[in-house]
Amino acid sequence: MKTVLITGASRGIGEAIARKFASGGYNVVINYVSSQQKAENLADELTRNGVRAVAIRADVGDPVQAKLLVKQTLEIFGYIDVLVNNAGTALTKLLIDTKTSEIENLLLTNLLGTIYVTKEALPSMISRQYGKIVNVSSMWGVAGGSMETVYSASKGGIIAFTKAVAREVGYSNINVNCVCPGVILTDMTKNITIDDMKELENETALGRIGTPQDVASVVYFLASDEASYMTASVVGVDGGII
């Protein structure tokens, strides 16, 4: 049975990804940093449904905790077949009004967290000559978003990181790809007004807002052997909004 480690998996897109892999029979590691009850409830639910699932607390923006997260996963399951770097936070603010601490905290979670966990997971993948890594960026990492400058920078960094790592580890039979969600119905979008949400729907080619399940399906495909000839790819899951 294969094992997937998903960062930021207690809710939203991460939760949907965890459920998708569980439905495929994977062992699931649900990483969280603050939503302990949600993470443990999800792990219990998935376990009752017949897969092995555990919740592990770790702040991926801390290199020590990122290392421990991977170490604990390997101790429990022996290997990591799939790593999904999903943990992230948002910030909507004019750059000139953004505090240095806010910039640092966002970059730590979104970009450095992705780098730290990948760095720790790679040795075991390389030794096995097998691995799938899927990084979750954003449409703003491609297009850039006004009042989301630091967020856009962090997500753009993930895209560049994906392409670079893919070229480093391709000969070890490790695929590294990236998904860029558009407007998705999660906690991050719950404060958008009805009028603004309608405008976003109108800007989307498919005429609807995305769901976490839309993203999870693409992540699952990229982690499958059906995508074995895809690496360094950046896949938009945005309904055609950009």
Image (cartoon, rainbow, N blue to C red):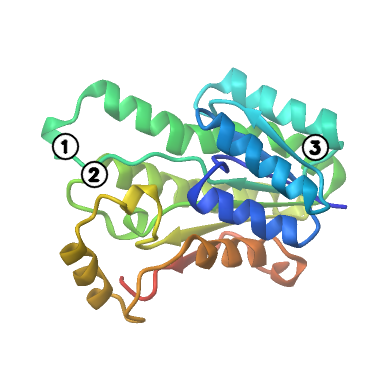
**At which x and y percent is residue 55?**
68, 34
> Badge 3 local density, few (<14 within 10 Å), some, or many (20+)?
some
Q: Is residue 125 left or right of residue 104?
A: right
Q: According to the image, label 3 marks what residue?
A: 124
- Amino acid found under the numbered disc labelled 1: Leu
Q: What secondary structure is marked by label 3?
A: helix
Q: According to the image, label 2 marks what residue?
A: 149
Q: In which quadrant of the rendered view does residue 92 lie?
A: top left
Q: Are marks 3 and 1 in contact (CB under 8 Å)?
A: no
Q: Is residue 177 left or right of residue 44?
A: left
Q: According to the image, label 1 marks what residue?
A: 95
Q: Nearer the viewer, residue 239 or 173?
A: 239
Q: What secondary structure is marked by label 1?
A: helix
Q: Nearer the viewer, residue 87 or 25?
A: 25
Q: What secondary structure is marked by label 2?
A: helix
For the C terminus, give its image quadrant: bottom left
Q: Is residue 187 left or right of residue 97?
A: right
**At which x and y percent is residue 63?**
57, 22
> Badge 2 local density, few (<14 within 10 Å), some, or many (20+)?
many
